Image: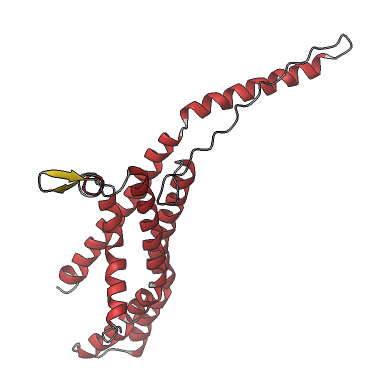
Amino acid sequence: MVANQPKIQILLQASFLAPVIVVLMWIKPISRDLLLRAPMGKETVQIMSDTTYNSVRLWTIVVLCVLRLAVIRYHLQAYLNLSERWVEQMKREAGRITVLEIQRKITRIYCYVTVVSLQYLAPIFLTLHCTLILKTLGDYSWGLYPEPALTSPAPDAIPVCQAAASEDSGSEDIQAAVEQITASLSALGTVFTPLFYRGLFSFYVWWIAACQVVSVFFGLYFHQHLAVS
């Protein structure tokens, strides 16, 4: 289908290796240590800072997700072309083959297009959404240079109004409940820090990519060895 289009072939190969690239970016000795402390003879050279590396990693994941979305038409068309190959294979088989059997074979492929599309798109959107959440909650930046930290003013203490003699007990209960909820949210804020979100969603991104790598290589082995036999 793309035998005479070398540029499309390069994009398809890059799309195939995209999950492997994402997995390697989270292996510290291969990616982070190599870029932050690159060995140059007897010395080590820092190619980029830690902040720049995190931004480059986010941008790389987004670009790879967009690339995989751009070549989805070629993958789905290759799946639909299986019907033609199956028909040619059935014609070479011995015995009489009815038209109904051929129709069932072709219909089965077209009915599973939605399943194949979901299997292809779900990991991409999961990876993209986890990356965006990692950037937002992990306090990362899209820029390649560190941004100045924005210091937000400390929240003012909630003033406790003196209850007048004529004030009923209902307003006091509401005020106490508001203060209790505010204290609980402040306590949760000390637990769910940007460092916590970085570890959580970084693991999600790595795990999704690792599952893709395992499933892709298992499918490749199946179609090249088991399905042929």
Q: Nearer the viewer, residue 121 or 87?
A: 121
**Residue 83, placed above or below residue 17:** below
Which residue is drawn at the image coordinates 60% and 30% (left, top)? 153
Q: Nearer the viewer, residue 96 or 52?
A: 52
Which residue is drawn at the image coordinates 31% and 72% (left, top)? 11
Give the left or right position of residue 166, taking residue 207 as reference: right
Could you tell me residue 169's position as x and y percent? Answer: 81, 14
**Residue 112 shows in the view:** no
Could you tell me residue 185's position as x and y percent? Answer: 58, 27
**Residue 132 shows in the view:** yes
Q: Quadrant of the N terminus?
A: bottom left
Residue occupying the far right of the picture: 166
Give the left or right position of residue 107, taking residue 29 as reference: right
**Residue 172, placed above or below residue 78:** above
> Residue 5, located in which quarter of the rendered image?
bottom left
Number of numbered discs: 0
Which residue is drawn at the image coordinates 44% and 41% (left, top)? 138
Residue occupying the far left of the picture: 42
Q: What colouring style does the render use?
A: secondary structure
Could you tell me residue 209's position as x and y percent? Answer: 32, 54
> Residue 180, located in which quarter of the rendered image?
top right
> Residue 179, located in which quarter of the rendered image?
top right
Q: Quadrant of the C terminus?
A: bottom left
Q: Nearer the viewer, residue 68 or 77?
A: 68
**Residue 35, placed above or below residue 4:** above
Could you tell me residue 105's position as x and y percent? Answer: 34, 80
